[in-house]
Image: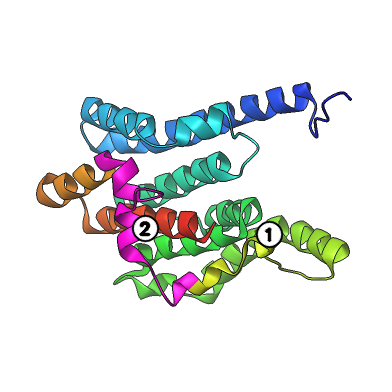
Amino acid sequence: HPEIVTYSSIFQFLTRIGAIFYFILGSYLLMSKICRRFNCIKNIILFTLTITSTNVVSYIAFDSCFSHIYSFAFVCILISYLINYFSENTINFFHIGFILGFLFIIRNTNIIFIALLFPVFWGNYKLLNFKNLISFLIPFFIIVLPQLIYNYSGSGKILFSAYSNLGNNFDKLSKPDIFNVLFSVNYGWFFWCPICLFSIFIGILNVKLNKGIKLILYISYYMRKTITKLA
């Protein structure tokens, strides 16, 4: 019997092209913002080391059908927008809603990246007004609504867990296994990506960043690990 392949070769090829495109897009936008504020050469070296020492390359070359590389791209875009806020003191909530909407439909658990907005509002509560809320919600729901309708038409539920057959992974939120998440031989973050442990300590000791940017980068690190654990 011939081997059954769910997806055609052209589909698999195009998903890899798409993964490469979104990786370049997200990386370029983020690095262009960082290089305007900090030493460009050092940040390019750091960014290259981080990419080559994590599983990003694997998701581009072998697992481009997964959502991870697309989440990576839109998180980079989101962080670049927030860095722009701290450098120019301007923020477009319409664009933020658009980006978070895409993050949500790429992977529902990505909604946790809304935590990256906390540094924006820290000490600047005037931004929490009705106008900005509407500017955020309109593009967010324009992007999300078709996905919610599709979910309901296919499953009878507006939201559902795509990992339901793998067990209830969300109970780990109440019982976090922090040591294994960080140091386990099977899936430990610091065990498999030791450069991340090194970069955190070096960043805390030496990098002189705006407090808001520093908080954004720290939150993004731990949001990534939380989502990886839930999956």
Question: Which stretch is magenta?
Answer: 172-195
Look at the image and tell me whether residue 71 can be seen: yes
Q: Which residue is mark 2?
A: 181
Q: How many circles with numbers are drawn on the protein?
A: 2
Looking at the image, residue 208 sits to the left or right of residue 58; the answer is left
Label 2 and label 1: CA atoms lie apart by: 22 Å
Q: Amino acid at mark 2?
A: Val
In the rendered image, residue 24, in percent from the top left (x then y), is placed at 50, 28
Check if residue 179 falls in the magenta segment: yes
Viewer-nearest residue: 191 or 55: 191
Look at the image and tell me whether residue 85 can be seen: no
Q: Which residue is mark 1?
A: 162
Q: Residue sitting at 55 percent across and 66 percent down?
A: 169
Residue depth check, mark 2 versus mark 1: number of the one nearer the observer: 2
User: Eyeballing the image, is 114 above or below 4?
Assistant: below
Check if residue 183 falls in the magenta segment: yes
Query: Where does the N terminus fall, quadrant-wise?
Result: top right
In the rendered image, residue 200, in percent from the top left (x then y), is placed at 22, 49
